[in-house]
Amino acid sequence: MKGFTSTILHSDLRRPIEHGSLHKPVHTSVAFGYDNAREIAEVFQGKRKGYSYARQINPTVAALEEKITLMEAGLATACFATGMAAIAAVMFALLRQGDHLVSSRFLFGNTNSLFNTLTNMGIEVSFVDATDADEVAAAIRPETRMVFVETIANPCTQVSDLEGIGRLCEERGLLYVVDNTMTSPWLFRPVTVGAGLVINSLTKFIAGHGDVLGGAVTETGRFDWSRYPNIYDVYKKGEPSGWGLLQIKKKGLRDTGGTLSAMAAHQIAIGAETLALRLDRSSSNAQTLAAFFAHHPAIERVFYPGLPVHPEHERARALFRSFGSLMSIELKEGIDCFEVLDALRLPIVSSNLGDNRTLAIPVAQTIYFEMGPERRASMGISDGMIRLSIGIEDIDDLLDDFRHGLPT
Ligand SMILES: *Cc1c(COP(=O)(O)O)cnc(C)c1O
């Protein structure tokens, strides 16, 4: 079986499953019993596969982890309660005082906030323009441990130089971490450009219905952990390809406790079944709307990688299956974004993205408010910017609504 959707749909049944159930059952037990005392000791020592305590591992969550590993064509995955818990666990588990992180400066707002917190804990962060691998190269120092980028950035849709940075990280032996949330493994697999770790906020496209939170870190096998200085001796077990994720599971997931619940894992698994179908539809809707906005008199600028005028259009076309469903529009000076939003009937004014429903939010006044005007300006975020996460509605309804809602 090779197809993306058939693989996801049938992944649970690759292993024997209770009562032939078509879905992995929701296991609610916090702890697990053993036949004898030796068995529990072997599980705790990692000598035998088994479930110790549900903060660290749960059979329903493990089934979802396997699905995500298949989606990303990786080696293994750890799931978390949210995307932020996944990112925080990677940083907490793998960085130490005195280390240096090179990050894209076009970042999800809370990731930006987290990285600023790291700088107060003795970890230095350089924020660079990741659309250019040379900028990343110029920021590398002897203490650099990791390069972190997103695929398509929020809200101006910059596309990182994913291939160039991958080559650079390989040459320099650096860990390359790619947040794949905006593209999801259906549009792009970061393993193909050499990412060592892939992050997904499952909350967004993978779960897809705006009704559950989750996050994941996938080990791709592309990074040689025997070259990474921060791995504790106890986690140097078996092949080096497994050391990083083991340390993330222990120092990240176990010690910080951002665990995904079994019920949430079940909901995410259901959503994941239709990832490809949903994203094909919402990407196609987004492409049509972007073309409509590009010629609209009320709109100054459209940020969408599917438009030929987008600075990284060719790169996005070469790397991604389609251009995704996230875009931003900048209204012409003098047009009030609150009035425009209130005139629209279909899009829901909401902060999430990757829902089946079209969502819209004024950017500068909400999700990027806390970072202040200076950093907003450096990210190209103006006061008249609206971010849209296009859903799977019928395209004619979306076009009608924007035709009526936008001033002419
Ligand atoms: C939403 C998002 C996150 C955080 O995910 P949560 O599940 O909301 O914690 C991280 N990165 C990107 C690119 C996101 O869009």
Image (tube, helix red, strand yellow):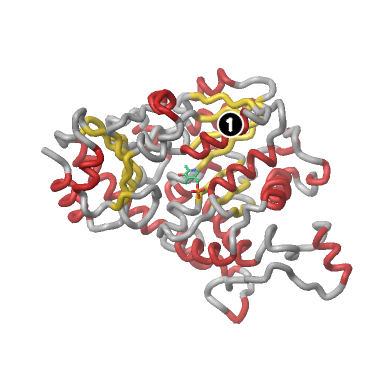
Residue at x-position 22% and y-position 36%: 336
The picture places residue 400, in percent across and down from the top left corner, at 15, 51
Q: Which amino acid does label 1 sit on?
A: Val
* Residue 94 visible (yes or no): yes
Q: Is residue 146 above or below residue 220?
A: above
Residue at x-position 58% and y-position 38%: 177
**Which quarter of the figure has residue 148?**
top right
Q: What secondary structure is marked by label 1? A: strand
Residue at x-position 50% and y-position 45%: 189
The picture places residue 219, in percent across and down from the top left corner, at 63, 46
* Residue 170 visible (yes or no): no
Taking the view exactly as shown, the residue that stands out farthest to the left is: 408
Q: Is residue 137 above or below residue 230?
A: above
212 vs 216, left or right, is left
Camera-side residue of 38 and 91: 91
The picture places residue 89, in percent across and down from the top left corner, at 64, 44
**Which quarter of the figure has residue 62?**
bottom right
Taking the view exactly as shown, the residue that stands out farthest to the bottom is: 19
Residue at x-position 74% and y-position 70%: 32
339 vs 174, left or right, is left
